[in-house]
Image (cartoon, helix red, strand yellow):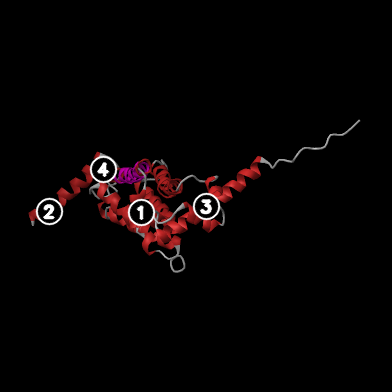
Amino acid sequence: MTSSSPGPRRKPAGASTARRELVENEIYEQAIRLFAERGFAGTSLQDIADALGITRPALYYYVKSKDELLAKLAADVAGGSAAQITEVAARPDLDPVGKIREIARLNVVRVATQPERFRLLIRSEADLPPALSRAYDTSRRAVLKAVTGVIEDGIRAGRFRPADARVAALGVIGMCNWVAWWFRPGRDGIDAVADQLADMAIAAVQRADHRTPDGEGPAAALKMLRQDIDHLERLLDL
């Protein structure tokens, strides 16, 4: 009886997938670095291939265009942020104050841990292809809608000042996003900065303690209004 020789050994599918992910991540990191240094328009696929030490045809095996890399950046920065903030806004275990605190902290930490990518995405908005630009705008609108909704809930509950909820939401978002331009990891602690800005976000929308109604709904608001009328009547009697 003759024994057959074994055929060529195949690599496990998991190992192949893991290697591809490593290569794709390296391509992405090099592309982000070059986009930041030279701008999106000033960077070619050949530049990215040269930085990786591979040929352009080899690069095409993993990525077909610069737009793919820019799309990944938009999904990582804007898409991920929109998903997390929308999730926090829908949490039933948090009141409006707790939601604003969590959203502000989440946004600050996210921006502070990847400031270069956030700044790069802002600078690259004009280079986004139409489909990607629409997706990016959708993510930003989702964030604004979620934060505006939380502030509106806080206003209805009497926890927040009766202000324009959209303007207030833009103020909170803008304050957190600005971290990308001044945060320095070696000098500032992420948690301390996130806590401070979360406190400031709450202070920007919250009523003063003595103006917070005792409860929620119309009855609590009317009770506070009657207290104001009683105070006014006493002043008029003087």
The Cα atoms of the two marked residues, 3 and 2, are separated by 73 Å
> What residue is rendered at 56% in x and 48% in y?
58
Q: Say which residue label 4 marks.
A: 220
Quadrant in the picture for residue 89 = top left
Q: Say which residue label 2 marks.
A: 234
The crowd level at tag 2 (other Cα within 10 Å; few <14, some 14-19, many 20+) is few
Q: Earlier in the sequence, mark 1 or mark 2?
A: 1
Residue 130 appears in view: yes
11 relative to 204, above or below: above
The crowd level at tag 3 (other Cα within 10 Å; few <14, some 14-19, many 20+) is many
The Cα atoms of the two marked residues, 1 and 2, are separated by 55 Å
Question: How far from the left and from the top, in percent, is residue 118?
Answer: 40, 55
**Amino acid under label 3?**
Ile
The crowd level at tag 1 (other Cα within 10 Å; few <14, some 14-19, many 20+) is few
Q: Say which residue label 3 marks.
A: 27
Mark 4, secondary structure of its residue: helix
The magenta span reads: 134-151
**Amino acid under label 2?**
Arg
| Magenta-drawn stretch contains 101 | no
Q: Which is more foreground, mark 3 or mark 1?
A: 3
**Amino acid under label 1?**
Ile
The Cα atoms of the two marked residues, 1 and 4, are separated by 44 Å
Mark 3, secondary structure of its residue: helix
Q: Quadrant of the N terminus?
A: top right
Mark 2, secondary structure of its residue: helix
Name the disc covering residue 122, or none: 1
Q: Which is more foreground, mark 3 or mark 4?
A: 3
Side of 157 where 63 appears, left or right: right
Q: Earlier in the sequence, mark 3 or mark 4?
A: 3
Mark 1, secondary structure of its residue: helix
Q: Are marks 3 and 1 in contact (CB under 8 Å)?
A: no
